[in-house]
Image (spheres, rainbow, N blue to C red):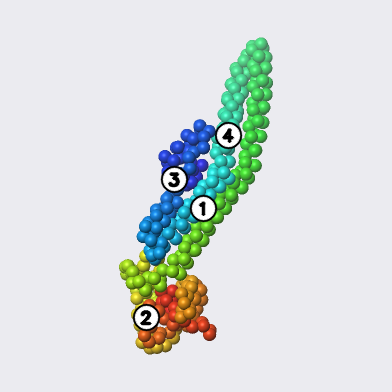
């Protein structure tokens, strides 16, 4: 239970504050979470740089996505607290304490019963023996009654486990929904940045790159450059061969791409197209062909196939 609280609210000071408000039966003040805070700072910075600039526009898009993730995080906390943590806490602080109390009472009754049996064994006089037998009957009756109460309470744990199992399933589903939402938000953000950033990136010469090893020998080029957009821009050795020989190659599309004009070819991620070089074409572009459709395609979106 404690670790679930830590997961839902990592800040110990915030947990203490929420605990105090709960004990005072007052509603804790709403606080902005970390993704929402980051999102707001990104939006403010993007607005300052200018929504019309590539960087400012990208910051605003990232900020909006972070705020959506923050909202999803808030929904996860509310759902998990209501459907999983609260029933668990109610059991531990309610029924479980009752069961523990009755078990302790049963233990005391067993000690009383053992003491009564011992006194009966030691009784020698008839009067004392009769009194001890009466005491034994009473303590045995009290023990049996307490044993039955405890047994019923312990048997109820089976149904409690079934209830907690449903609560656990609700918790898992809430997490699954949260991570699916986050993945979809980031996927949408990646597509938004991918559609608008590379063309601006190439045309405006706003490159800021650092060399990193190529992840695969099949990716265009033997080395890659990582840009602030998160896309991999290759420094192609086999692309040079393709341009020099004037032949064509099959290439797999890495990201969706919407054509900016009629001279370009729109692309769908994972489709395979034919690419070839045209004399005089910008080094960052190839000519792509899909059936009867033909147009320029950015090399940053392609992976050459053997």
- Please name the residue that numbered disc 2 is placed on: 282
Numbered tag placed on residue 94 in the rendering: 4
Judging from the image, what secondary structure is the residue with disc 2 in? loop
Q: Earlier in the sequence, mark 2 or mark 4?
A: 4
Left or right? Give the position of 160 relative to 199.
Answer: right
Image quarter in which the C terminus is found: bottom left
Q: Is residue 238 visible?
A: no
Near-viewer residue (223 or 45): 45
In three-dimensional space, the C-alpha distance between marks 1 and 4, rounded to whole angstroms, equals 31 Å
Q: Position of residue 30 (x, y in %)?
A: 48, 43
Label 3 environment density (alpha carbons within 10 Å; few <14, some 14–19, many ≥20): few
Q: Position of residue 133 (x, y in %)?
A: 67, 18
Label 4 environment density (alpha carbons within 10 Å; few <14, some 14–19, many ≥20): few
Numbered tag placed on residue 10 in the rendering: 3
The relative height of residue 240 versus residue 127 in the rendered view (above or below) is below
Label 1 environment density (alpha carbons within 10 Å; few <14, some 14–19, many ≥20): some
Q: Earlier in the sequence, mark 2 or mark 3?
A: 3
Task: Tell me whether circle 2 and circle 4 mark residues in contact (CB < 8 Å).
Answer: no
Q: Earlier in the sequence, mark 3 or mark 4?
A: 3
Give me the residue at 62% from left, 15% from top: 123
Q: Position of residue 175 (x, y in %)?
A: 53, 52
Q: Earlier in the sequence, mark 1 or mark 3?
A: 3
Give me the residue at 45% from left, 40% from top: 15
- Please name the residue that numbered disc 1 is placed on: 72
In three-dimensional space, the C-alpha distance between marks 2 and 3, rounded to whole angstroms, equals 51 Å
């Amino acid at each position: 239970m404690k670790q679930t609280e830590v997961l839902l609210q990592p800040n110990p000071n915030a947990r203490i504050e929420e605990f105090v408000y709960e004990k005072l039966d007052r509603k804790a003040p709403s606080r902005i979470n970390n993704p929402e805070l980051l999102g707001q700072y990104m939006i403010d910075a993007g607005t300052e740089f200018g929504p019309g600039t590539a960087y400012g526009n990208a910051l605003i898009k990232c900020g909006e996505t972070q705020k959506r993730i923050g909202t999803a995080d808030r929904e996860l906390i509310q759902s998990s607290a209501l459907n999983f943590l609260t029933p668990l806490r109610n059991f531990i602080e309610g029924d479980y304490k009752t069961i523990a109390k009755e078990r302790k009472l049963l233990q005391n009754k067993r000690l009383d019963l053992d003491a009564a049996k011992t006194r009966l064994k030691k009784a020698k006089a008839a009067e004392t023996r009769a009194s001890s037998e009466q005491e034994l009957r009473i303590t045995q009756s009290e023990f049996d009654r307490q044993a039955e109460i405890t047994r019923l309470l312990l048997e109820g744990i089976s149904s409690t486990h079934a209830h907690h199992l449903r609560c656990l399933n609700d918790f898992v589903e809430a997490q699954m929904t949260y991570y699916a939402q986050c993945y979809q938000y980031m996927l949408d953000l990646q597509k938004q940045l991918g559609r608008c950033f590379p063309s601006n990136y190439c045309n405006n010469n706003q490159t800021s790159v650092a060399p990193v090893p190529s992840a695969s020998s099949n990716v265009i080029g033997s080395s890659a450059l990582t840009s602030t957009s998160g896309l991999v821009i290759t420094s192609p050795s086999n692309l040079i061969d393709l341009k020099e020989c004037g032949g064509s190659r099959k290439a797999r599309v890495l990201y969706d791409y919407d054509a900016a004009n009629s001279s370009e070819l729109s692309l769908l991620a994972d489709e395979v197209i034919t690419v070839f070089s045209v004399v005089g074409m910008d080094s960052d572009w190839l000519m792509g062909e899909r059936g009867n459709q033909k147009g320029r395609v950015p090399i940053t979106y392609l992976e050459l196939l053997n």
